[in-house]
Amino acid sequence: MRNILIIGAGRSATSLIQYILDKSEEQDLLVTIGDISIQNAKRLAGGHPNAEAYVLDIHNDQDRRNAIKDSDIVISMLPARYHIEVARDCLEFGKNLVTASYVSDEMQSLHRKVEAKGLVFMNEIGVDPGIDHMSAMQVIDRIRDGGGKMLMFESFTGGLVAPESDDNLWNYKFTWNPRNVVLAGQGGAAEFIQEGTYKYIPYHRLFRRTEFLEIEGYGRFEAYANRNSLKYRKIYGLEDILTLYRGTIRRVGFSKAWNIFVQLGMTDDSYIIPNSEELSYRQFVNLFLPYSPTDSVELKLRHNLKIDQDDLMWDKLVELDIFNKQKKIGIKEATPAMALQKILMDKWTLKEHEKDMIVMYHKFGYELEGKKKQIDSYMVIKGEDQTYTAMAKTVGLPVAIAALKILNGEITTPGVLRPIAKEIYEPILKELEEHGVTFNEHFADYLGYNPEGVGG
Amino acid sequence: MRNILIIGAGRSATSLIQYILDKSEEQDLLVTIGDISIQNAKRLAGGHPNAEAYVLDIHNDQDRRNAIKDSDIVISMLPARYHIEVARDCLEFGKNLVTASYVSDEMQSLHRKVEAKGLVFMNEIGVDPGIDHMSAMQVIDRIRDGGGKMLMFESFTGGLVAPESDDNLWNYKFTWNPRNVVLAGQGGAAEFIQEGTYKYIPYHRLFRRTEFLEIEGYGRFEAYANRNSLKYRKIYGLEDILTLYRGTIRRVGFSKAWNIFVQLGMTDDSYIIPNSEELSYRQFVNLFLPYSPTDSVELKLRHNLKIDQDDLMWDKLVELDIFNKQKKIGIKEATPAMALQKILMDKWTLKEHEKDMIVMYHKFGYELEGKKKQIDSYMVIKGEDQTYTAMAKTVGLPVAIAALKILNGEITTPGVLRPIAKEIYEPILKELEEHGVTFNEHFADYLGYNPEGVGG
């Protein structure tokens, strides 16, 4: 039997492990699941005869190296910062590796050695990054193979709550790491290019410069800019493209209300609030407003951010109960971001029966035979429940499919890779389709940014 | 003759050196002026018989150590980050040291050794920090010695243009390092305490939460919060004070207009603009606005920041010529902050005959015999010209006075110090008065933040 080692049996590994176990008989696979928590590992092994669950502390060099040495291929589902240790062992023992995370500089630096040993280290093969790369490159290659010239590429992804489980005014619940949602967009200005002009949006303006997207059957969404769109010029081979923009999808109205937290300074993670544990939600809000012995926190907030009496944003704040005098932050040495996360988790945590939803939307503008054309391509995937979420499915399936194809010698190009070559994305996208991961395409003339030819 | 070594003969050293040279005959002083530029050193030595100007590169360990070894006291007017090297040599060779800079962690870590050797390392003895410490502690000590209990301390300083040289709509010119002005307030939220409540202002709101100050004969000013007011609780021994706030003074209206640059992201110093050298001022502004093939940069800016047609902020922008299509940034690999500084320096550079002005304003609230009182204390100092500026005078005189008093054994408390003890500030403030550095005081009842007793 061939031994597939899966390190990390967290929430994102459910669909991945299910897929591999389903194939284990026919493919003669032993599935070894190592996690710091034996409960996690056992739960995902599910008593399957071809599965083996055990405790693996990746900080224990001996145990980690032994596990990797005994395997035929390694899948790392660890937090991104831990992949590099695993990668170094894989290189030493000559094992292929699959991860769903962004290629770090450290990982990239192994490329020549990995290539020289004929190994495949496949990264960024989850949903975002992952399915976005593959589905985009498939269309881009098709356009270019047909003689077209790419003018514009815009790509948007969002992890949202499915409509049937959507019951709050924000039309949002946490379907992934809440901390990442609270900190999203921080660390520098968002950079992109539109019609050949560089554009920069500072963090404090990010949630006020959104654009709308429409998906048949699902209605309207909005998107705010991701931090670095420009690096995709090189990765996708779009060096001279005029417009390149990547963004994050939310339901309409989310960003305008989220901007209140940004403006007040509540998403700051750089300092600790004195006595944060005992602070009420109301006192937390008041930290960010001018002192007044007489005016209410509510009126100070409305006045400070010029929120009209009938603005629906206000109801969103009230729904979160941020003016409550009794509820306490309850976290020692909390930063503002940690305190805000606590308040949001009260209301935005998915219940056991509730479903998440992944939305991805690409726009491709190109010129073919003197005519400007546009293809819009989108995907909507809903989760089944809180175990087999859309996130787990869209992250895990491409990882699992890639791992088996590498194990079976169907993907062989060596090096530290992303799934952007046709030999990789074609078979994987084909198999994803069988699992319901499909894109709809719409064709139109490319209108660019000046559809009416107005102005001057 | 006693040898006073002055390292660094930049613009802030003029009044300092003049003061010491004026005393050199009577006090039997040799004034050794070392600078990386011999022109700088010679210019400030001015051919005085007791002055010696020479090239000193402080990165040359041998030269620096020899200079310090040969001196009787060292004054470092270098940029703050270079003091530590000088301080280590002073410690080794048993020399006293004076600087006008904030005590760094590295400097503070020398305290025990400096104390053990009986040396005086006097820091923060310029204007801000410096005169602010001394003038504030004098009043605070007076209040406490008289049995009063401190309730509130607010302190504001600004380097401005003198009214007679004030000829632009911003009522502002650069009188100090322009880069520090452009970056002011960055690096984290401003923290302070008001009536016992902690308050935080994120950078992007800093210039919209100002307060007004009125000075007889000079009219109205405004102030925005400095980053860290809270550390002064410990330094001034005001651990249980209810209100502590430090701020920077500008003329009224400056902050509201400056906020436009902050909002757009033009003060960001964290990334480089592609092809910055060739960018016109207009193109620079357009980097921060949405793309449009038809709308003007002007209208996009007005719309984006909701600037009314008759808002005077607009004239401030026009005065800076930021919409000019011909003028180029002209700096390679410029960050937005560097590009903005270039644009501002076109208009905000003081001409040779123009004068600067330093404004300092303290408010002390206290309780005495059951009654709440307030003292307002302020200082306005104008420069003579572009050599003997108010900045050079207010930074240099306290440094010079302190250095002579240490040399003459009038200040002896050893350690890494700030001028907050009475034995230090009393004689220095007294001598500063003779040079026109005086404070006006106004007495009133302390009204606090609820003067009318309104609300509920």
Image: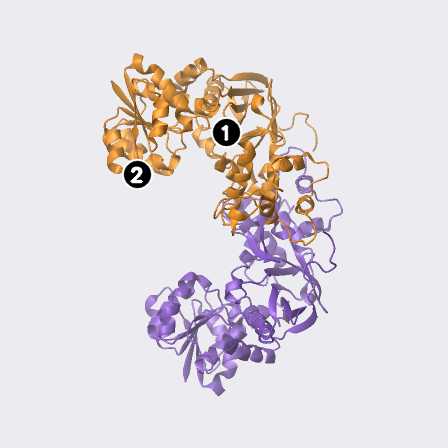
Chain colours: A purple, B orange
Cα–Cα span, label 1 and label 2: 28 Å
Identify the amino acid type marked 1.
Thr
Regarding residue B192, the answer to whether it shows in the image is: no
| Quadrant of res A386 | bottom right
Closer-to-camera residue (B220/A265): B220
Q: Of label 1 and label 2, which has the lower sequence position? A: 2
| Quadrant of res A116 | bottom left
What is the crowding at mark 2: few (fewer than 14 residues within 10 Å), some, or many (at least 20)? few
Disc 2: which residue? B59
Residue A247, numbered label? none
Q: Position of residue A404 (x, y in %)?
A: 47, 80
Regarding residue B388, the answer to whether it shows in the image is: yes
Kindly indicate whether the residues beneath marks 1 and 2 are on one polypeptide chain: yes
Check disc 1 and report its element: helix, strand or loop: loop
Closer-to-camera residue (A198/A356): A198
Q: Position of residue A328 (x, y in %)?
A: 58, 47
Q: Quadrant of the C terminus of chain B?
A: top right
Q: Position of residue A203 (x, y in %)?
A: 57, 50
Disc 1: which residue? B175
Q: Locate residue A52 relative to residue A431 in the image: left or right.
A: left
Q: Locate residue B231 relative to residue B400 in the image: left or right.
A: right
* B170 versus A165 height, above or below: above
Label 1 close to label 2 by CB (< 8 Å): no
Q: Quadrant of the N terminus of chain B?
A: top left
Q: Position of residue A145 (x, y in %)?
A: 58, 76
User: Number of callouts in the render?
Assistant: 2
| Quadrant of res B5 | top left
Give the chain of mark 2.
B
Closer-to-camera residue (A217/B375): A217
Give the chain of mark 1.
B
Identify the amino acid type marked 2.
His
* A72 versus B443 height, above or below: below
